[in-house]
Amino acid sequence: MQVTRLVLDTNVVVSAHLKSTGFERFIFELALDSKVRLCISREIMGEYEEVLMRPKFGLPPKLLHETFRRIKEAAIWVVPSEIINAAFDPDDNIFLECAEVARAHYLVTGNGRHFPGRWKSTKIVNARELTMILVPEL
């Protein structure tokens, strides 16, 4: 059986750190535990690091170090091969670029309005929607 490949928007990763429960945390933990395959690019990892280290979140450096280590170990690393300009927020195009080259099944975001409903073979969903797809009995 093929393992689900996904790309996580930064807002999902931030939410997973700010709340110890919830759909974002559930999906993030699935990715870190390799129950689903997190696809990532150098640009996305850089954004995760920059955003999560912002003082306004007050996240402990030790926790962030562990998060970054686990992401780097669990992720499938890709190198986008083309520039895409399809997201409503230009900064979000890195997620579409990663999803395309990784042939991700899902791009998970809390800002669905920033993306088209689908990008080629990748469906754009929020964490709740993906949870219902992966675990329909919930």
Image: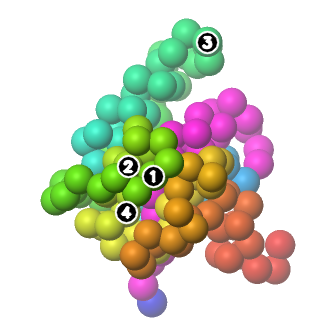
Q: Which of disc 1 and disc 3 is earlier in sequence? A: 3
Distance in Å between CA atoms under marks 4 and 2: 10 Å
Q: Could you say whether the residue bearing mark 4 is in a helix, strand or loop?
A: helix
Q: Which of disc 3 and disc 2 is earlier in sequence? A: 3
Give, as a three-letter code, the residue at label 3. Lys
Q: Could you say whether the residue bearing mark 3 is in a helix, strand or loop?
A: helix
- Are dots 4 and 2 in contact, CB under 8 Å? no
Q: Nearer the viewer, residue 46 or 60?
A: 46
- Are dots 2 and 3 in contact, CB under 8 Å? no
Q: Could you say whether the residue bearing mark 2 is in a helix, strand or loop?
A: helix
Distance in Å between CA atoms under marks 1 and 4: 12 Å
Check the picture and name the quadrant holding the C terminus.
Answer: bottom right
Q: Is residue 116 shown left or right of residue 104?
A: right
Q: Quadrant of residue 117?
A: bottom right
Q: Which residues are magenta?
A: 2-22
- Residue 75 seen: no
**Foreground mark, 2 or 3?**
2
Q: Residues within 10 Å of mark 3 (few under 14, many from 20)?
A: few
Name the residue tied to disc 4.
99
Distance in Å between CA atoms under marks 3 and 1: 26 Å
- Are dots 1 and 4 in contact, CB under 8 Å? no
Distance in Å between CA atoms under marks 1 and 2: 5 Å
Q: Which of disc 2 and disc 4 is earlier in sequence? A: 2
Name the residue tied to disc 1.
87
Give, as a three-letter code, the residue at label 1. Ala
Q: Could you say whether the residue bearing mark 1 is in a helix, strand or loop?
A: loop
Name the residue tied to disc 3.
56
Distance in Å between CA atoms under marks 2 and 3: 25 Å
Give, as a three-letter code, the residue at label 2. Asn
Residue name at image x 62 percent, y 54 percent: 112
Residue name at image x 62 percent, y 18 percent: 57
Name the residue tied to disc 2.
93
